[in-house]
Image (cartoon, rainbow, N blue to C red):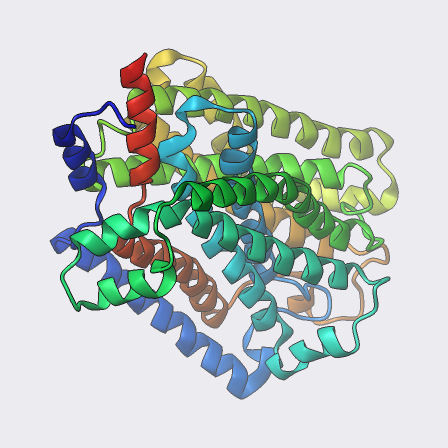
Amino acid sequence: MSTLSQVSINKITADLLPKKFGKPGIIWTTVLVMLSIGGLIGYFRQLQSGLSVTGMRDYASWGIYISNFVFFVAISLVGSLITAIFRLTNVSWRTPLTRISEIIAVSAIIFAGLIIIIDMGRPERFTNLFLHGRLQSPIIWDVIVITTYLALSLLFLYFPLLPDLPIMIKHSRAGSVNQKIYKFIGSFWKGTAEQFRISESAVKIISIMIIPVALAIHTVTSWLFATTYRPGWDSTNFGAYFVSGAFLVGSGGVVVAMYVFRKAYSLQEYITEKHFNYMGKIVVMLALLYLYFNINEYLVPAFKMKKAEEHHLMSLFTGEFSYLFWSAILVGMIIPIVVLLFPSGRKPLPMFVMGVCVVVGAWFKRFLIVTPTLLSPFLPISNSPESYAHYHPTWEEWAITVGTLAGALLIITVFVRLFPIIPIHETIEEQSKAHKL
C-alpha cells in the first residue's frame, strides 16, 4: 500500500501526464514534418533516376547513407545501457531516464533499417535478403540482429508502459482518439498482482536478452566493415571501437533529451541536477574509453605505416578530411571530457551543450569511418574521372539524410504527445518507498 498522500499522487500524475503542444511545440513539429517531406521528395527523385542522382561513384560506393545508418545503430544502443543494464544493477536514479532512452532506441533502429533500403537504390530488391540470404554473409547477420533488437526494444518500451495506461484512460477525454489508442493497446491491464508479477518477469527476461543483442548489433555492423579488406577497416579492434562509440553517442543523446524535456515540460522536480551529474560522469568514462580505442585504431597502423594505409591516414591527419577529423575528435571527445570532469560542467546547461557536441561529433565520426577508406583503395585510383577520387553528397542525399533524422525526432515527438515520457506509476512507487524510509 502506498504511503504517499492522495494529494502527492495527484500532483505526480498531473506533472507527468502528456500535455498539448504549445506554440513552440507546434513550430517544432511543423519543421520536422517539412524536413521529412523534403526527404521524401529527395527519395522520389532517387527512385525516378536511380543512384545516379547521388554523389556516390565506383570508389565511394557508400556515402552519407551508410554513415547515417551506423549513427542510428550507434545511438540505439542507449536503450540497453540505460534501461537494461541500469535495471539489472538496480541503479535507483534510472526511473526518469528509462522511457527517454527506449523511445530514442526504437526511433533510431526503425530508421537504421529504412536507410539501408534507401541505400539499395532499388527497394524491391530488399525482399532478396530474406528469400535468398546466405548465413555466411555479414549483411544477413546485420538484418537478423537489427530485427531482433527492434522487437526487443518495442517490448521493452511496451511492458513498463502498461501500468500507466489505466491512468491515461482515466485522465483522457471520453471517446477521444487518445483514449481509443490507450484502450486498444492496454485495456486488458487491470493492475492485479498477477499481472504485475508477469510484467516484471518479462521485463527482467528482456533486460537479460537485450544486452547481448545490443552488443551484437553494433559488433556485427563493425564486421560489415572489418571483413572487407580495405585500409582503415582491416582491423580486429573494430568491434570494441564501434561499441564504445555507440555507448558514448547514446548517452549524449539521452543527455540532450533530458534537458529538452526538462525545460519544455517543467520536469525539474523529476529530472534533477543529480541525474545530470551522474550522466556527466558516465559520459566522461565513455568518452575516455572511446578516445582510447581511437588512439589504438590509428596509432598501430601509423606506427607500421604500410603503403596501403598511408594514403588513408594522411587524408585524415593532414589531407582532405583533416579539418573534419580533428574537429570530430576535439568536439566529440576531448572538449566533453575536459568540461565534464568539473562539477560545474555537469550542471544541466553545460551538460546539454556537451551532449550536442557528442552527438554532432559522433555523426561526422561515422562519416569519417566510411568515406576516407573508400577513397583510399589498395590499388591507387588511376585512369578514372577526377570526380571518382572525391565524394560530395548531392542535395538529394542531404535531403534524405536530414529527412531521416527529422523522422526519428518526429517519432519521439509524437510519442511524447501521446504518452508520459517519465513513467507515472513507477515514479509514484519509487517516491512511496522513499517516503517509507
Q: Quadrant of the C terminus?
A: top left
Would residue 56 appear left or right of 233 to someone viewing this image? left
- Displayed quadrant of residue 322: top right
Residue 294's place in the image compared with 41, above or below, is: above
Instruction: Report which quarter residue 285 is drawn in.
Output: top right
Count the marks: how many? 0
Residues 408 and 48: in front is 408
* Vertical order, 391 against 280 (above or below): below
| Position in image of residue 99 (x %, y %) | 40, 43
Residue 30 in picture, x, y percent from top left = 23, 64
Q: Is residue 5 above or below residue 57?
A: above
Q: Residue at x 60, y 42 (%)?
A: 205
Q: Is residue 341 visible?
A: yes
Q: Is residue 327 visible?
A: no
Q: Residue at x 47, y 82 (%)?
A: 45
Above or below for 209 versus 141: above
**Between 148 and 187, which is closer to the camera in this rendering?**
187
Residues 154 and 42: in front is: 154
Foreground pick, 59 / 274: 274
**Percent from the top left, x then y, of residue 166?**
28, 51
x 36%, y 24%: residue: 276
Q: Quadrant of the N terminus?
A: top left
Q: Is residue 119 left or right of residue 278?
A: right
Q: Is residue 400 left or right of residue 57?
A: left
Image coordinates for residue 253, horizontal then vertical, percent: 43, 40
Q: Residue at x 50, y 37 (%)?
A: 83
